[in-house]
Amino acid sequence: MNDIDALISKAYALSKLGRYEEVAEYCDKVLAINRNHTDALHGKGFSLAKLGRREEAIEYYDKVLAIDENHTYALHNKGVALGDLGRHEEAIKCYDKALKIDRDYTYALSGKGLALRHLGRHEEAEKITKKLDELRRNKK
């Protein structure tokens, strides 16, 4: 295991413990070695979002997406951050991009359904709920 792998592993373990300030610090250490490391950029964004710093988190998700436009986790988490800021239309666009990559990505489906409900688009949200129910039934 190299230094970057060790640092990412430590950041992941700290994330599981909810120690997001430390996660951000470990991600910064990785980014000092490789500023385009998508796992570190995503981890930094995720930790910032968990710390309530959603605008900054979005900037990090955008950095990930500039490197890998198909990074479904960054698309989903950017959607979550946008939704938390009340920017539901933008969030839906992120979820839709993630769903183009993986149409059964349950986190993106769930986020999109929530955003649609916030916008009062209940019929569309209900279709998503039915799809999620179907996916859960088929998974068993």
Image: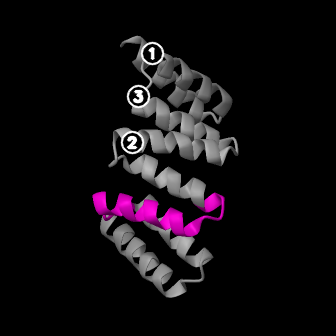
Which residue is depicted at the point 40% across and 19% down?
5
**What are the residue bounds of the magenta stretch?**
83-105
Q: Quadrant of residue 101?
A: bottom left
Are the residues flagged by discs 3 and 2 in contact, CB closer than 8 Å?
Answer: no
Viewer-proximal residue, 128 or 70?
A: 70
Position of residue 139 measured from the top left corner of the image (x, y, whole percent) = 32, 63
Residue hosting label 1? 33
Query: Is 108 left or right of 56, judged from the image as shown?
Result: left
Residue hosting label 2? 66
Which residue is depicted at the point 49% across and 44% down?
61
The amino acid type, in three-letter code, at marker 2 is Ala
Query: Is 36 left or right of 54, judged from the image as shown?
Result: left
The amino acid type, in three-letter code, at marker 1 is Ile
The amino acid type, in three-letter code, at marker 3 is Asn
Q: Mark 2 or mark 1, which is nearer the start of the sequence?
A: 1
Distance between the Cα atoms at labels 1 and 3? 9 Å
Q: Secondary structure at mark 1?
A: helix
Q: Is residue 102 visible?
A: no
Q: Is residue 37 visible?
A: yes
Position of residue 39 measured from the top left corner of the image (x, y, whole percent) = 43, 33
Classify mark 3: residues with Cα within 10 Å, few (<14), some (14-19) or many (20+): some
Residue hosting label 3? 36
Position of residue 107 measured from the top left corner of the image (x, y, whole percent) = 45, 59
Classify mark 2: residues with Cα within 10 Å, few (<14), some (14-19) or many (20+): few
Q: Quadrant of residue 135?
A: bottom left
